[in-house]
Each structure stands twice: as C-alpha cells, then as structure tokens.
Image: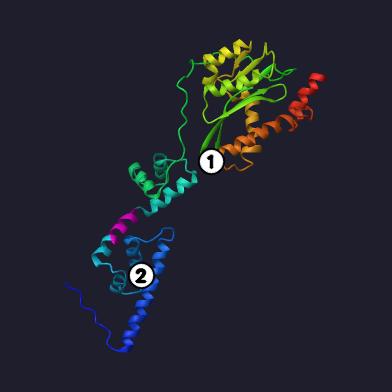
C-alpha cells in the first residue's frame, strides 16, 4: 500500500514553520551523529542511520531522510544490521571489561571461559570475532623454554638441609630464578646470594630463562674470586641446575652442588626472602614505563641492597659492611 502524499505548506506561516522544523531537525541530526562518532574522522551510512532512528520520535522520518538524501530502503537496511550487532551488546561490554580487568593478558579462549563463569552462553568463535571487531588483542607472548628438560628427579643431594648459617663468606651460596612482569614484558632475574650476609654476588636479568643466563651469572661470580674450593651452591631442582653444562662449571671450580627437595621452597628460603624484599621495595613500590626502566632501577637497587640497606641480623650493617668487618675483625 502506497504511503499518502504529504501535504505541502501553503501559507507563509506554514512555510516558516516548515523551515524552522527543517533547521531544527538538521541541527539535531548533526549533533546526534557527532556524538555517535566523536572519535572518528567522519560518520558512515550506518552512523547516519542510527542517528536518524534515534531522532525519528522527535522529527518526521521523511524529513530526516531528505536531509541526508538517504533512501528509505537504505535506512531500513542499515537499521536491520544495527539490530543484529546490538544482539551482542551485553556480551561486548563484558568482553571489554574482562580484557581490561586482566590488563590485556587474556586471549579469546580464556575470555570465553571467564564469560561462561559469569553466566554467559557463548562460544569461542563468537568471542574471537567480537574481540577482532573491537580491536582487543592479547599482548602476552608465551615464553619459549629451551628444549632440554634435564634428568628426572634431582641430580644432587640436599646438603644445605635448611642450615643456612655459616661463619665466613663464600662458604654457602644460593641461586634461583624469578619472573618479573613489567607491563606486557616478562623478565627473568637469576642472582647468586651469599648465605653469610645475604649479599648478591652476581646476577643476570633476561627476557628468557635460558642456560646462557645462568652461565653469565656464574661467570660474573667466578671472576670476583681467586678460589671457591669447597663452596656449596644451593638451588632448587630447576632444569637449568640439572643440565650437564651447569654441573660441569661447578665441578671445574671445585664447587659442591646442593639441591632442594622437590616442590619445597622453604629449602631455599634465603633466596625466596630476597625476591620478596626486592619486589615489595622496588617492583611493587614504583611505576616503570618500560622493562629498560626497571632493569636500570634494579641495578641501582641491588647496589643499595648490598651496600646501604642494613639488616638486624647483620648487627645493623649492610651486607658489604658486614662482610668487610668480618674480614678485618
């Protein structure tokens, strides 16, 4: 059935009223579409259609379409597409919230799982499509470990046996690796700690927990001392410490290897304690714009930790002060 033809204004008053309506509608339409696309360069047909739809209760639809020179069929076509898109409006908001809540660490699979935890029935393909549409991309990269996994079980006894006390430097050392997240970057810190005074003997920080990192840490430590005969170096059962190359280096310097029991962090509590202090005083206390900012700050912190930070168990001295006094006391 054809729509009845609209009566054209006849009198001057009617013409003025029609012109006034046209101007108000044009102004309202421009404001509406600007609000819809404030972050884009120019609105598309879909945005104009949405703006017209939101204003059609205030102004005649024919007038709004005429202002945009938009065919009625085009308007209804885009209106239909907008309604399909709005089908997932609630899901889109939830997906965006989850993504930002986890600071971009979640990809579409984990977001799908979290959506289901929150009561949504949605499959991973739909989540992936919505994330692509919204430009949400997981920034976290998987860490690629070296292929070597070491022997099954420990390769050295637990000689330390939680007896961390020692009467002189370079009798008992500890080592471990901890992961540090700076934004979307993962760093790995591998230090050696002297159990005598808690001093950090050497360290390496890397973007990958590989053997080269551990070798560099060892080489820096070995370069500081003429002899380390009889030193015990304690670690957990990490694959790096089971590797032949690591064990060979210790053997060449007449160092005795000691390993914690499997899954027992208390067996290496001195190293764990240092990590806890460093993270609370540096990592969590300051803001870092980049991994390089953190690496520089870590260098300064370890220098401070060794030379200035006093400890009650060291009689109010810093690790280096305590070591120096022990050598001349």
Residue 152 percent across, percent down from the top left: 48, 16
Q: Quadrant of residue 182?
A: top right
Secondary structure at badge 2 equals helix
Residue segment shown in magenta: 78-87
What predominant SS class does the magenta segment belong to?
Answer: helix
Depth order, front residue of 212/162: 212
Per the rendering, the mark at residue 122 is: none
Q: Report the coloring of the rendering.
A: rainbow
Residue 306 percent across, percent down from the top left: 71, 29
- Is 305 situated left or right of 326 in this image? left
Q: Is residue 80 magenta?
A: yes
Q: Is residue 174 magenta?
A: no
- Is 20 situated left or right of 146 in this image? left
Residue at 55% x, 33% y is 187
For label 2, the crowd category at 10 Å Cα-Cα, with few meaning under 14, some 14 to 19 and many 20 or more, is: some
Per the rendering, the mark at residue 55 is: 2
State the CA–CA distance, disc 1 to disc 2: 44 Å
Q: Is residue 24 above or below residue 290?
A: below
Residue 119 percent across, percent down from the top left: 40, 47
Q: Is residue 16 above or below residue 194?
A: below
Of the 4 image quadrants, the one containing the C terminus is top right
Q: Earlier in the sequence, mark 1 or mark 2?
A: 2
Q: Quadrant of residue 163?
A: top right
Residue at 39% x, 44% y is 116
Depth order, front residue of 269/147: 147
Per the rendering, the mark at residue 183 is: 1
């Amino acid at each position: 059935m054809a729509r009845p033809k609209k009566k054209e204004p006849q009198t001057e008053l009617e013409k003025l009223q029609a012109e006034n309506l046209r101007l108000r509608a044009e102004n309202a339409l421009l404001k509406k579409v600007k609000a819809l696309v404030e972050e884009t360069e120019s609105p598309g047909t879909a945005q104009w259609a949405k703006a017209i739809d939101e204003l059609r209760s205030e102004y005649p639809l024919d007038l709004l379409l005429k202002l945009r020179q938009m065919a009625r069929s085009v308007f209804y076509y885009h209106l239909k597409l907008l309604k399909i898109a709005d089908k997932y409006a609630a899901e889109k908001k939830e997906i965006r919230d989850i993504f930002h809540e986890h600071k971009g660490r979640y990809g579409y699979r984990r977001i799908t799982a979290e959506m289901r935890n929150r009561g949504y029935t949605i499959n991973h393909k739909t989540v992936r499509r919505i994330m692509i549409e919204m430009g949400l991309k997981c920034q976290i990269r998987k860490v690629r470990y070296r292929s070597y996994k070491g022997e099954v079980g420990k390769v050295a006894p637990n000689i330390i046996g939680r007896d961390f006390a020692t009467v002189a430097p370079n009798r008992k050392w500890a080592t471990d690796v901890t992961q540090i997240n700076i934004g979307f970057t993962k760093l790995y810190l591998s230090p050696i700690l002297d159990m005598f005074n808690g001093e950090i003997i050497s360290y390496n920080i890397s973007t990958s927990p590989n053997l080269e990192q551990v070798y560099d840490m060892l080489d820096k430590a070995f370069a500081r001392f003429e002899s380390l005969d009889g030193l015990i170096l304690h670690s957990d059962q990490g694959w790096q410490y089971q590797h032949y190359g690591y064990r060979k280096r210790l053997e060449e310097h007449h160092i005795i290897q000691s390993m914690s029991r499997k899954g027992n962090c208390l067996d290496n509590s001195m190293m764990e304690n240092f990590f806890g202090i460093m993270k609370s005083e540096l990592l969590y206390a300051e803001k870092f714009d980049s991994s390089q900012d953190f690496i520089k700050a870590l260098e300064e912190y370890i220098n401070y930790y060794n030379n200035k930070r006093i400890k009650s168990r060291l009689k109010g001295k810093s690790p280096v002060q305590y070591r120096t006094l022990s050598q001349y006391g």
